[in-house]
Image (cartoon, rainbow, N blue to C red):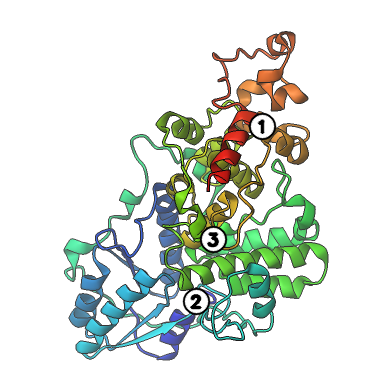
Amino acid sequence: MADHPALHAAADSDRPLICLYVLDDITPALHPLGAAARWWLHGALADLRRDLKKQGGTLLTLLGSAEKLLPQLAKLTGATSVYWHHRLHEKERAQDDRIRTALEQQGCEVRPHWGTVLVDPETVQTKQGGFYKVCGSFWKALQTHAVPEPLEAPSRLSFRVVPSSILSDARLNEDDLCPHAPDWAVDFRKTWEPGESEAQEHLEDFLRHSVAHYSTGRDRVAEEGTSRLSPYLASGAVSPRQVWAAIQKYGAHTEGPRIFLSELGWREFARYTLYHLSKLPFENLNPKFSGLKWRSNAADLKAWQQGRTGVPIVDAGMRQLWQTGWMHNRARMIVGSFLTKHLLIDWKKGDAWFRDTLVDADFANNAMNWQWVAGTGIEATPFFRIFNPTRQAEKFDPDGDYIRQWVPELRGLSGRALFEPWAAKDDDLRKGRVQLGRTYPHPIVDLKEGRDRALQAFREL
């Protein structure tokens, strides 16, 4: 409810409000929400409803076509204005335009606001009036813009009660957002609590304990060195402007806060790119890669998804994702590089899996980061930069704590044997109670051969 420009403007109208969320699975502008994001949505809606109830209101949730339901609700309730936040993708904006036209035809005005970005993406332009395709240049330009101060939550709201008979067939059964048989979200609930107050606690904890050491702590996969704000940002429980303002107040010129702000800038650049380049989630932004010969191997993809590749640091990341709906940022880079380089599987397969399993699933961030690690984006690491999983594990999980936590069958190993069990001595494996091929799989790809195969595919371009 804080820093929600649309809600703030609606409250200033001094008219009774209907607070509405529409889950559009019938005509989604992009892909439907994944399973993990739906679990998170369930908690986010419940939290918002509790906050509205404190002010005497409620939250109406509907399931169906937003293009049909919004005009219908406005007509049935006699609404004269509708407030929302601008969306980013070209298809989303086109859908909003159709809804706006339908509402205006029945005499209802639409008042959109920018609420999910730091600044209006149309205002950050090159000297030629175009848009930036390099993050460094975008970040430099963005810092010349004044980021609006975050808004306080409205102190007083009045509400219009919507009778249960109105659009009764379109009411969302929010329990359906959660898994039941089986309930795979048990560990999600142990790890996360969606909601606005929880988002503020995460932000305060980060400022108090981690931001000063962020430059190094963010890469240590076994440590709490990141903000863990991503699902709260993705769901709108905290706004980027609130985070921006908090870092500025803390002191943005020391190394940790400065680097964290640049990461917030990267997030903004992803959303900016989605706004200007609608093909971001669907196609290689660098057209040179349209001819890359990706492998189609269902067994390798499944092993990667299940954390059964035989490469411990990769399997640790994928199992953390499956159990908690989240993965450490450094681990995301490692597993992404492994999929797109060592396995030579299209980044879009990885993007689709992340969309379904991440509680922080975000079209802009997911696609931008996958294209970065795959080397196919306009701003990306070179394709020939291939992460060596063993070196990454030794550098960013030196004591092996992350691997042991998420791949417990390897807990008895130490040193190089933990990072490369396939190269370990038989005696070390026996002492560690590891039987390759039985208690832990053999690697599905030889790391050198996988690297050479990827470089050969790149040369053939």
* Front disc: 3 or 1: 1
Q: Is residue 458 left or right of residue 140?
A: left
* Front disc: 3 or 2: 2
Q: Amino acid at mark 2?
A: Gly
With respect to residue 280, does 153 lie above or below? below
Q: Nearer the viewer, residue 262 or 243?
A: 262
Q: Amino acid at mark 1?
A: Ile
Residue 403, disc: 1
With respect to residue 161, does 446 lie above or below? above
Residue labelled with disc 2: 115
At a point 29% along the width and 82% down the height, the residue shown is: 100
Residue 232, disc: 3
For residue 240, say whether it is visible. Answer: yes
Give the image location of residue 232, x and y in percent. 54, 60
Circles 3, 1 touching at the beta carbon (< 8 Å): no
- Badge 1 marks a residue whose secondary structure is helix
Disc 3/disc 2 C-alpha distance (Å) = 14 Å
Give the image location of residue 438, x and y in percent. 54, 13
Q: Is residue 30 left or right of residue 72?
A: right
At a point 18% along the width and 65% down the height, the residue shown is: 168
**Extreme front residue here?**
460
**Extreme right residue here?**
254
Which is more N-terminal, label 2 or label 1?
Answer: 2
Q: Is residue 70 left or right of residue 249?
A: left
For residue 58, say whether it is visible. Answer: no
Disc 1/disc 2 C-alpha distance (Å) = 39 Å
Q: Is residue 264 left or right of residue 181?
A: right
Circles 1, 2 touching at the beta carbon (< 8 Å): no
At a point 57% along the width and 58% down the height, the residue shown is: 230
Q: Amino acid at mark 3?
A: Tyr
